[in-house]
Amino acid sequence: MPIELFEMERMQSTWENIVDYDMSESGVRPLTLRELVDMGFDLESFLDTPLGYSQSNGTIALRERIAAGYPGASADHIEVTNGTSEANHLIALSQVRPGDTVAMELPNYMQMPGIARSLGATVRTFRLRLENGWQPDWDEFDRAVTPETRLLYLSNPNNPTGAVLDDDAMRRIADRCTETGTWLVADEVYLGAEIDRPRTKSFWGLSDRVIVTSGLSKAYGIPGVRIGWMIAPAEVAASCWAQHDYLTIGPNKMSDAIACVAVQPANRERCYARTRDILRRNLAIAREWVGGLDGRLTWREPEAGAIGLFKYTSDFPSVELAERVRTRQSTLIVPGAHVGLEGYIRVWLGGREEFLLEGLRRIGEELVNLP
Ligand SMILES: Cc1ncc(COP(=O)(O)O)c(C=O)c1O
């Protein structure tokens, strides 16, 4: 079945390298290879390493290190992938069949619906409610997740709200998936990017139906190495490996080696602390910007992640607003429509201070002129 365009990713890949201010990103400004060398990546010895194929499901060393962060997991539960997005994709390829139902929250990073529909599944959604701190609408949730639901995808912390599910919500979601026999795919790529709250809890271990996906792209700040992973029951990890053999075979050798360094607990915490530092400073800048816009924007500040999700006070369609900002200000933002929430814009808060200030200023220029 043909696959529909992934609107947000296509918009980003078309324009992000052309505009002056790419404010459509969602992670913190990335680390350099030099910073990874400072953390212990042995570049010198890597220069003499033959660039052959790497272990296709991730080297044992990397899988063991990742598994150590998830109680009860071993290397057999891990599949290392080319980014978190490939982990999500492999899970869908291996689990979803024509006629299945796939559930997901809205708003969301909209990768899963396109994949699910291309595999012949029907997508059911439930909303996260702003008035409820972006926790799920439980009536909608109960209707979306039933014994017919093959797979439920969510991201926690969530892209784009930056909200974190509370303990009761996590328990309720996991219990429902146990009861209905639904795979709960919890995309935790923003876990560790908390700004002023305790570390987000992982879904891992809350139900034997849980599959966690994550990677180096967001909380770690290393998207360019394209390393992600899943932690899944061993038979699910094995069936995803079978898909991986056909798709990309596996991650590249240098990325695997870099990831081996990044995921060591001390380095992981160093990356998370860097992320938190950047976000704390930038959040203050964003707060001041919103305050200066005379009520044209409202928001619930993110608890985690480098994204501001702003509601604007106009009926102007978000895609047209984003287009205005791009064409008139050479600045890229994500229209709410691309993440399942019309009337909002999604703005990157993870850049350098001077970049953020100018990017926000340009967006503001268009907001004050909205009909
Ligand atoms: C929730 C979520 N999952 C996955 C991805 C893609 O991650 P990766 O770069 O690791 O493939 C993104 C990117 O924005 C995301 O927001």
Image: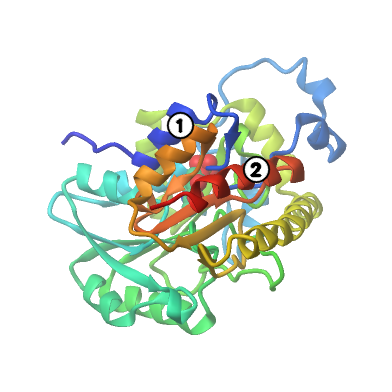
Left or right placement of residue 310 versus residue 121 in this view = right
Under circle 1, the secondary element is helix
Q: Amino acid at mark 1?
A: Thr
Outermost residue toward the left in this view: 99
Q: Decide: is 90 above or below 48.
A: below
Residue at 57%, 49% (x, y): give it: 364
Of 312 and 235, the residue lying toward us: 312
Mark 1 highlights which residue?
327
Judge: label 1 CB < 8 Å from ligand 1: no
Outermost residue toward the bottom in this view: 168
User: Which labelled disc corresponds to residue 182?
Assistant: none
Left or right placement of residue 332 versus residue 98 in this view = right
Left or right placement of residue 196 versus residue 213 in this view = right
Q: Decide: is 205 above or below 251.
A: below
Residue 238: horizontal and vertical position, in percent? 41, 46
- Quick one: label 2, few (<14), some, or many (20+) residues within 10 Å? many
Of 361 and 332, the residue lying toward us: 361
The number of numbered discs placed on residues in the rendered structure image is 2
Of 142 and 60, the residue lying toward us: 142
Residue at 50%, 63% (x, y): give it: 161
Residue 153: horizontal and vertical position, in percent? 37, 60
- Quick one: label 1, few (<14), some, or many (20+) residues within 10 Å? few
Colour logic: rainbow
Under circle 2, the secondary element is helix
Q: Are marks 1 and 2 in contact (CB under 8 Å)?
A: no
Q: Amino acid at mark 2?
A: Leu
Residue 138: horizontal and vertical position, in percent? 33, 81
Mark 2 highlights which residue?
62
